[in-house]
Each structure stands twice: as structure tokens, then as C-alpha cells.
Amino acid sequence: MNAPATPPGKRPPGPRPAPLPVGAPCPRPGCDGRVESTGFCSTRGHAVRCAAPGGPGGVPPVPESPPTAGARRRAETAQLFTVGPAGDGLLDLPVISTPSPEALVVTDPRVPAGGKTCGHEGCTAVVGRSYAGQAALPVGFCDRCGHPYDFTPRLAPGDLVGGQYRVVGCVANGGLGWVYLAHDMRLDGNPVALKGLINDRDPVALQREKEELRVLIGSDHPDIVRVINFVSHKDSTGPGGDGQDKDSQDGDGPGGDSSHTRYIVMEFVRGMHLSQVRDRITRGEGPFGEDRVFEYVLSYGCRILDALESLHRKNLVYCDLKPNNVMHYADRIKLIDLGAVRDLDDRTGHVLGARGFTAPEVVRMGVEGLSVRSDLFTLGATLRTLSEGCGKQPPGLGAESYARVLARATAADPRQRFGSAREMAEQLRGVLREIRSLRTRTETPEPSTLFAATATLLDASLGRVPPLERWLTGEVRPLLDPGLPEPGRVPHHLPVPYPDPADPAAALLAQPTTSGPRRLIQQLYASGRETVEICFRQLRAHLELGELDAARERLTTARALLGGLAPYDWRLCWHQGLLCLARRDTEAAQGEFERVYHALPGEYAPKLALGYCAEKAGAPADAERYYDAVWQRSRSTQGSAVFGLARLRLAAGDRTGAVALLGSLPEVSRHYDAARIACVRVLAGRLEGGDGPLLPDRSDLAAAFGRLPRLYLDEGHHAGPARDRLEAEILEVALERVAVRAGAARTGSRPPAGPGDSTDDEEFTLRTRLEAKLRRLARQAPAPAGLAALVDLANSVRPKTRF
């Protein structure tokens, strides 16, 4: 009887040929070459690593497609997927429509292009690479550690595994095993994935498979691949193998029977690896070529971090995160290939990780370097790989915030990285909201978990009705003050950090209090506690009292309490920045807030502080980038940012732009009324110009007078001292404008007033109204001298009688 034909992709029965050692003579007749570490002849480049047993005549290895063909195959597979637009939600991803599972089967499962990392006992050498244009060898030895490798698939189409799963073919290979598509014959042919081992002779790999089984069985996270079953299958390629299924569903672990190979049965995920998504991003293809691409990358990061957090809570680390180990299916993601997952309490064995994605301390120390932070490094490297080929950049400050969040995640010193997956996810979401808001110019607010929104406004005067002293200083026609606060007052207008929940005094500090700063300092001392957060709270109280030396002493105590963690605690930098502002050292404060921004790239508080520092330093372009990022993200709570943007417009002489910004503050904002007052003052204000004060035109003044009755002033009353002062300010400017135009017309430097412009009747009306307002202001004077000054001012603007 003729022997049955060997199925495609499967090695003929019988023992494997023994590879020749490095340096052995080339087995080809008449060849004087030697076997090199690549597995090829040194003279003629023959593939000679696998020699036929019992004779010098070598047999060629299983034919192998060159790497370019493998890359072409991956590209062809990727084209089977269609990608539709994403929804409008913050974390929404493009929708991937998948082909039939059978369309994903690889017809020529060979050595992966570029080879694979050996991984045996931590060996980082690459095995199975092509040589001199020839295909790579599927079987051989690592030239560094000498360990054998075998990339030949164990299963062929039609094999029945475990008496239940009919193999269709190979679809991929992971770090340790081939992945096959199979149909569950007991569940109406439902597609499943079978994963076995590449190096089934490797006890380390076998132990890792046990770990993967344990992790998969215990995992119930929707973004982690789900295990269904585990079975073993008779290895037809081993000694005496007959190719028939001798399935087992008992508890035998991998390697319990050398003639059986263990397979994990998992849900079949029909989607693209993120490495395929990266290719589409690089090509700018479909939704991955849109301006929203960085938002998709950050969405991947947030979803992956949620899955990692579920592992970390079980004291497990993933270790081997990379684009090939994450799949995008439909509008979701799934972590696959958990063979490298390990318990943090297990410090034995070796770490499996991909080159370029493994944290440096793990490369240097092995398992001793593993931690939650090493996992976060792999995620940062994965996100960077996805985005580095993108031709587009996030708008505004978004590009810098994105770069900073990756820089912290991949810092060489693990203590400089994020402390947990949840902490990193919060910052990723913050950067995502920032980029989305800057792109769409619509807010995407989310309360900060680190900073409390302040009730005060980063504005010295623009949003306030001018005080009575404005008319008592002797300066009759002052320029409009844009309201940039002095550095010493800024610490009181910036957001306040929430107490660290881990601080022993967190509960005490979270209690509301009506005590003033002096009494609060005394009460905290009386508590008998000396914690970092108590020092910070006392520091802010001392700044409020102007006691800078005492504030510096509290900062020194907090640094001492933190000990070796002090260089990595952003709270120290924040409070040092506040102290520098109180000392009017804006440049030093900017450096401290830069460090906070690096640590917390998704937070708005350090950007608001940096915006002020840049504005104070005379760098309007930098200030605008910071203010705009804060303002666009949360317009209802970030009134300080829009006032900063308005000041920048006023400095450029853009009255209309400043009013438009201030007028866009939502009514729900606590600073809404201040913004409406500021609009009126800007419309009627004297701005600094090149040749003198820049006065508003007729339409600006009309708009100011039109807005005045709608302002909420004097506790809602239609008349009162605040409304009188604001109206008097507008009338003064209106009268000045009339006088300037009248004087210009008399001298001939400007044409006479035309229809609808200033007239003598208009001047008479303005003088009459202003005189009445100034006499009303005189009633607000606290002293006789002020009363007299205001009466004199009223008399000076009194119109001449017509009779």
C-alpha cells in the first residue's frame, strides 16, 4: 500500500535530521566549505544545517519563502479587513469588519520573517533568519546558546484534536507557539484558536505554557483572550508517531508525555494585530489617516491599561506587550498570547520579552527587574511604535503632551515612570481629552482626581467693576488694565492639589473648615501629626499670610519626610513653584511647573501655571498654547484660561477677539458674570496704541452700552454703586472719543463728522449723563476729600448752557 501523502505544511513521519555542528565540513559533495552559525555553507552559501542521518549527503530543509514573501502575505491578509469610521465617543475606535476565519489561514506556515528570539534561559539571540538571499531554516540550533529550535507546525488541515476540534490551518505564530484555526465539532463548527508550542522539547517553554494556562483560566477580563479548553494531541512527527489522534482531556501538563503536544483552546479573535494597524497608520489609510489617529492610539492605551490593571491586581505582570500581542476586532481590543505572564512573587526562571519593548532594568536584571512599572514601559513603547510613522501631529499643545506621557512611561529610571496602570490611564485620558478638544474646538470636560477647581479667577482687575479709587488717584484717563496678576498673588488663584489618600492625615485635611489661614496652621500643629500633606497645607496657608520663610521651612520638612522619594514626587515641585511665585521668581517657578507637567501631562493645572509664567515672561505664543489647551478642554471650569487668552488679544490690540473669547464662557461657569463685566470694559476701554491710546469706535461703545443693563451687578438690582461706576467709565471714554474726533475735524487732520457720527448734541448728552454719574459717585466717597474731588470732576465735565 502506498504511504499517504504528507499534508501541506507538515513534516514527513520519522525522526528529525540531526543538525550539523558549527564548523563541521559542508556535506555537499566536492565542497570544501564549513557550516557557519547561520546554518549555511561558508563557501557556496548552501543551506546545510540539517543533514540527513547516516550519510554526508545533506537534504535540503523544508522550502521557505523569503521574508519579502512573508511580508507580502501579511499585507495580503491585512487587506482582507475593511475598516469603517469610529463613533463619536471619547474612546471609540474604527470598526473593523472581519472576513471569514478561513480567509485568514496561512497556506505556507514558515519561519517568521526576520527570525525569532531564542528565549532559552534568557538568550536574546535571533534564530531562523534568512541568509544571503536564501530562505531561513525551520529547524536548527541557536548559534549563541546551542539550544535547538523547530518552527515546523505540528498540526495539518483535517487533524482532529481532542476528539472535538477539526484543524483548518495555521493563522499566526506567537512568541512560543503556532496558532491554528479549528472548528468545534460539538458546537456547530464554532471557530476556535488552538495554540501549541514551537519548542516542545524546551522545559522552560513547557513551564511557561503551564503559566499561560493558569492565567487564562483565571482571567475574566473582556479585553483579555478567553480560554475555552485545553487538550493534548498525539505528535505524528515524533518517534513512532502514527499520525492518529490519541487525544486526552485529563489534567496532564505539557511534557507529561513526550509523544503528545499540549494545546490551549481559546476564543478565535477575528481582527488585526496592532502591527497591521501600524502599517495602515503609516500609509495614512482610511480612518487611520484622519486627524483623529492619535486619539485612536491613546484609546488603545486606555483599554490596554484597563486589562493590565486587572492582571496587576492579581500580582501578575504581562511582560511581553507589543503590537503583535494586541488585536483590534470590531471596535474593541483584545490582549492575546499570555505566555510570558508571570507572578511577581516568582523570581525564578527567565523573562520572555521583545527587543525594543522590554524595560531596561529587565534587560539588565532579568526577573529581578520585573514590576508593574516594567509593564508600563512596554505599553509606552507600544504606543510610540504605533504613532511614530504617522505623518500627522496632534494640534496645539497636544503633540507635546502626547510626547511627555510616552516619555514618562518609558523613562530609563523606573521610579520616574507612572506608579500604576490606573495612574497612567488617568493621564492618558487627560491627554486624549486635550487632543480631542483642540481638534474639534469643543470641550470634553472631566473632573481632575488630583486638583480641586479653584473658585478664584486668575485676573487682577479686568472682570471687576473699577473701584472708586480709580477717580480719586488724579489720573483722569487711565488705560484699561488687562488684569495680569502680580506673581505674589498667583498662588492663591491656582488649583489646589487634593490630599494624597495614602497620607495618614488625608481624612483630617479632607474635612471642610471655616478657619482662616492663621487659625488653620495652629489647628494642624495641635493635631500632633507631622505628615507630608499637613506640611503642604500649612505651606499654602503661610503663603496666604505672606510668610515666605515659614512656607520654605514647611517645604523643607515635607522633603525630609519623603526621603528618597522626594526627587520623584510632583507635589514637591508644585509647592516649590508656588513658593517661587510668591518670591516673584517667575523663571524658577516655570522650571518647577515644567517638572509637574512632565509628571502629569494630562492635567490642566500645571499648564495653567505655565501659561501665566510664559505670559509674564513676555512669550505670548507659548502662553497661548498653554491657555488654549486648558480652555478648550473645559470651558465651564477654566475661566482663568480664557481671561489669559483675552489678555493676549488685548496686548495685540485685538479688542474684538478678546470680547469674542470672554463672551464664549458658558453661563454655568462660576466666572460667567466676571467675563460679562470684562466684555463691557474691553469694548469701552482705552487700549495701548503706537501713537497714543487706542479708543473704541462707535459700534464698540454702542455694544458696551447695550450690554450694561443685562449685567448682574449690585446683587441683581437695576441701580447701585457698582453699576454707576461702570457706566461712568464708559461715558468717560465715549466723551473722550467725541472730543478727539471734534478736535481732529477742527484741525483738518480728519474729515468732518459724517452722518451718524459725533455731533454737538451727542457731546452735550454725554457730558450731561457723565456729570450726573460723577455726582452719584461722590455719594460713595468715604471721606470729605474724596467727595470734593468727585464734585470738582463732575463740574469739569458739565456741559455749557445753551442759553
Image (spheres, grey):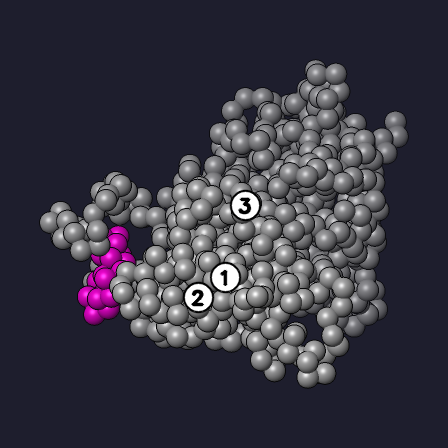
Work out whether residue 420 or residue 557 is closer to the camera in this orientation and state it: 557
> Residue beneath label 2, please?
794
If the image is split into quadrants, where does the C terminus sit? Answer: bottom right
**At 73% from the left edge and 62% from the top edge, which residue is drawn?**
756
Q: Position of residue 734 (x, y in %)?
A: 58, 65
Q: Earlier in the sequence, mark 1 or mark 3?
A: 3
Q: Position of residue 185 (x, y in %)?
A: 73, 18
Horizontal placement of 276 versus 460: left or right? Answer: right
Instruction: For label 2, count other residues whose C-alpha is less than 10 Å away and answer few (under 14), some (14-19) or many (20+).
Output: many
**At 44% from the left edge and 66% from the top edge, which residue is drawn?**
794
**At 62% from the left edge and 41% from the top edge, which residue is drawn?**
91
Work out whether residue 56 or residue 456 is closer to the camera in this orientation and state it: 456
Work out whether residue 696 or residue 535 is closer to the camera in this orientation and state it: 696
Q: Which mark is residue 710?
A: 3
Secondary structure beneath label 3: helix
Q: CA distance from mark 3 to mark 2?
A: 26 Å
Amino acid type at image mark 1:
Leu
Q: Is residue 233 magenta?
A: no
- Tally of numbered discs: 3
Q: Earlier in the sequence, mark 3 or mark 2?
A: 3
- Of discs 3 and 2, which sits in the foreground? 2
> Residue beneath label 1, please?
770
Instruction: For label 1, count other residues whose C-alpha is less than 10 Å away and answer few (under 14), some (14-19) or many (20+).
Output: many
In magenta, the rendered stretch is 531-555
Instruction: For label 3, count other residues whose C-alpha is less than 10 Å away and answer few (under 14), some (14-19) or many (20+).
Output: few
